[in-house]
Image (cartoon, rainbow, N blue to C red):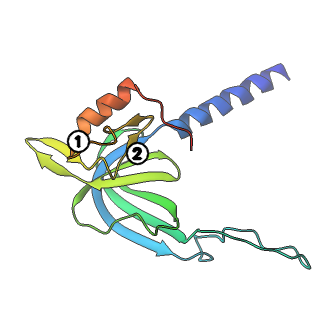
């Protein structure tokens, strides 16, 4: 019994570490799919009412979005080359995944927290818009009032230092 508790605790810890690890990659968008609620891969936001019950469901969920990205390079985290699929819900402000042929950087801090920005390359360094990607892990990519692009290497180094805790959501 004691061994089972130790194994269970170790598995819980491993799962927590795996889910907390962020992913940062560059690549090219191959496909963006928007689905309405109730579609095959986009469940309704509220469970169906029990027979005979009165049920009200209020939601700002607009549907689901999926973005397939052909991976050029993984900068942080674990990802297999080829195509990486990102899936999130569409909120009240509409879809956030972009349709572009430009190279992009994608940051996934957890399952539902995915952000992306087009990449600009200058002198062999990659730059992105910090207004589109505000966080890598628990660190801001740039001060809130900053203007201009941020070097991806600098943002990753700042995230490694983990100098600013991310506020709770």
In primary-sequence order, the first of circles 2 and 1 is 2
Q: Which mark is residue 3?
A: none
Q: Residue furthest bottom?
A: 52
Q: Which residue is mark 1?
A: 150
**Marks 2 and 1, how far apart at CA:** 23 Å
Report the side of 105 relative to 59 (left or right): left
Q: Residue furthest right?
A: 52
Secondary structure under badge 2? Answer: loop
Task: Tell me where residue 154 appears, x and y as whole percent.
Answer: 25, 33
Task: Tell me where residue 82 appears, x and y as whole percent.
Answer: 34, 55
Is 119 placed above or below 31 here?
above
Q: Which residue is mark 2?
A: 79
Is 100 placed above or below 156 here?
below
Q: Residue at x 40, y 25 (%)?
A: 163
In front of the other: 73 or 163: 163
Task: Tell me where residue 6 appears, x and y as whole percent.
Answer: 74, 22
Q: Residue at x 83, y 20 (%)?
A: 2
Report the side of 141 relative to 167 (left or right): left
Task: Tell me where residue 146 appears, x and y as whole percent.
Answer: 26, 42
Q: Where the N terminus falls, by quadrant? A: top right
Crowding at dot 1, Cα within 10 Å, few <14 / some 14-19 / many 20+, comes out as some
Q: How many marks?
A: 2
Secondary structure under badge 1? Answer: strand
Report the side of 24 relative to 168 (left or right): left
Crowding at dot 2, Cα within 10 Å, few <14 / some 14-19 / many 20+, comes out as some
Q: Residue furthest top?
A: 2
Q: Residue at x 39, y 69 (%)?
A: 32
In front of the other: 138 or 71: 138
């Amino acid at each position: 019994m004691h061994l089972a508790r130790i194994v269970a605790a170790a598995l819980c810890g491993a799962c927590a570490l795996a889910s907390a690890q962020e992913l940062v990659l560059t690549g090219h968008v191959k496909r963006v799919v928007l689905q309405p609620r109730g579609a095959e891969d986009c469940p309704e936001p509220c469970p169906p009412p029990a027979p005979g019950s009165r049920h009200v469901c209020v939601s700002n969920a607009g549907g689901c979005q999926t973005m397939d990205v052909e991976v050029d390079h993984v900068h942080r985290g674990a990802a297999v080359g080829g195509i990486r699929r990102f899936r999130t819900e569409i909120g009240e402000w509409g879809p956030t995944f972009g349709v572009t042929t430009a190279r992009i950087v994608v940051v996934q801090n957890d399952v539902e927290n995915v952000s992306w920005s087009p990449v600009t390359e200058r002198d062999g360094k990659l730059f992105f818009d910090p207004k589109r990607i505000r966080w890598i892990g628990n660190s801001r990519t740039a001060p809130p009032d900053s203007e201009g692009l941020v070097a991806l290497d600098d943002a990753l180094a700042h995230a490694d230092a983990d100098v600013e805790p991310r506020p709770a959501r």
